Image: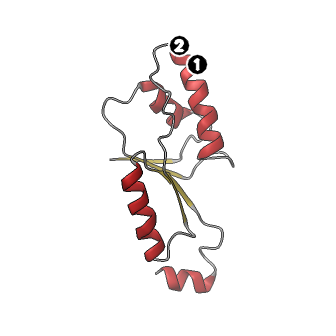
């Protein structure tokens, strides 16, 4: 499928941005993508996104603002996403969910694992 789409130019400029908070798993993922020839289509970042969300020293509105700025900078610098897939821990603070859903990325389609 990738080869057929590439021949038609269908994947030109298509890039998936994702992040993995666990360093070892991220490096394994990058190695797998490289081995499969997919690294040019996937920007796998080895870092947590909005790691400061949940910090008790800031009010929720400030955390959402900070997270929204980080998302805009790291995940969706061109604006709204077509698709967002997330796999977050059940204890993730609501500020992160609100930033993902209603912030600068505001995905048209959301998949939650």
Q: Furthest residue to the right?
A: 78
Q: Exactly how many numbered labels are in the figure?
A: 2
Query: In the picture shown, does residue 40 fall above or below 54?
Result: below
In this figure, which residue is indicated by the disc labeled 1?
62
Image quarter for residue 31? bottom left
Residue neighbourhood size for the residue with mark 1, other residues' Cα within 10 Å, grouped as few (<14), some (14–19), many (≥20): few
**What SS does tag 1 mark?**
helix
In this figure, which residue is indicated by the disc labeled 2?
59
Query: In the picture shown, does residue 89 fall above or below 9?
Result: above
C-beta proximity under 8 Å, tags 2 and 1: yes
In the image, what residue occupies the spot 49% across and 77% down? 37
In the image, what residue occupies the spot 67% across and 46% down? 77
Tell me if 71 is positioned left or right of 20 in this view.
Answer: right
Q: Position of residue 26 (x, y in %)?
A: 42, 55
The label number, if any, that marks residue 38 in the structure image: none
In the image, what residue occupies the spot 66% across and 45% down? 79
């Amino acid at each position: 499928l990738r080869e057929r789409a590439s021949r038609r130019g269908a994947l030109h400029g298509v890039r998936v941005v994702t992040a993995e908070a666990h360093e070892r798993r991220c490096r394994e993922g990058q190695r797998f993508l490289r081995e499969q020839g997919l690294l040019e289509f996937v920007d796998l970042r080895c870092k947590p996104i909005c790691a400061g969300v949940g910090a008790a020293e800031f009010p929720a509105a400030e955390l959402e603002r900070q997270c929204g700025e980080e998302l805009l900078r790291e995940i969706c610098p061109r604006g709204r996403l077509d698709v967002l897939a997330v796999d977050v821990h059940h204890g993730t603070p609501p500020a992160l969910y609100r930033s993902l859903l209603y912030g600068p990325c505001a995905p048209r389609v959301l998949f939650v694992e």
